[in-house]
Amino acid sequence: MSKKTKRKKNNFSKFIVTLVILLNILFTAAVLYTFLKVGSEPMTLIGCWFAFTTGELWMLSSIKKSKIIGEGMVDAARAGSQTKGEDGQNEH
């Protein structure tokens, strides 16, 4: 994978995290404004919103973690194949 492609994918995940944080701030401000005007808070909406955004961030981190583990396994396999001799046995 080229550096440009890797940087683009890394920027995408950073963009998503930043977007979720900004949306949470805007949502919180909107809920506070609604509470000020109406006098009650939408508890179910608040719970669902934060469950959704937490789930999105959790899934993004799971994807990132599995890619890192996958790359580590590929690197380990490459390193292991470089230390084996022609007969497939490890060299000492």
Image (cartoon, helix red, strand yellow):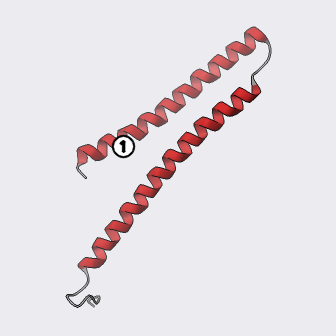
- Residue at figure coordinates x 24%, y 78% from the top left: 82
Q: Is residue 3 left or right of residue 41?
A: left
When asked about the image quadrant of residue 27, the answer is top right
Label 1: which secondary element: helix
Quarter of the image for residue 75 reads bottom left
Q: Residue 12: image x %, image y %?
A: 38, 38
Q: Is residue 83 above or below residue 8?
A: below
Q: Position of residue 51 (x, y in %)?
A: 65, 37
Quarter containing the C terminus = bottom left
In-image side of 43 versus 87 (left or right): right
In the rendered view, would you say 19 is above or below 59?
A: above
Taking the spot 47% from the left edge, 55% from the top edge, the residue there is 65
Check the image and name the residue furthest to the left: 86
Question: How dense is the environment of label 1, judged by Cα within 10 Å: few (below 14), some, or many (20 and up)?
Answer: few
Q: Which residue is mark 1?
A: 10
Q: Residue at x 41, y 56 (%)?
A: 67
Residue 68 position, x and y percent, is 41, 57
- Left or right: 68 as drawn, with respect to 38: left
Q: Is residue 36 above or below residue 90?
A: above
Q: Position of residue 79 (x, y in %)?
A: 29, 74
Comparing 70 with 3, the one in front is 70
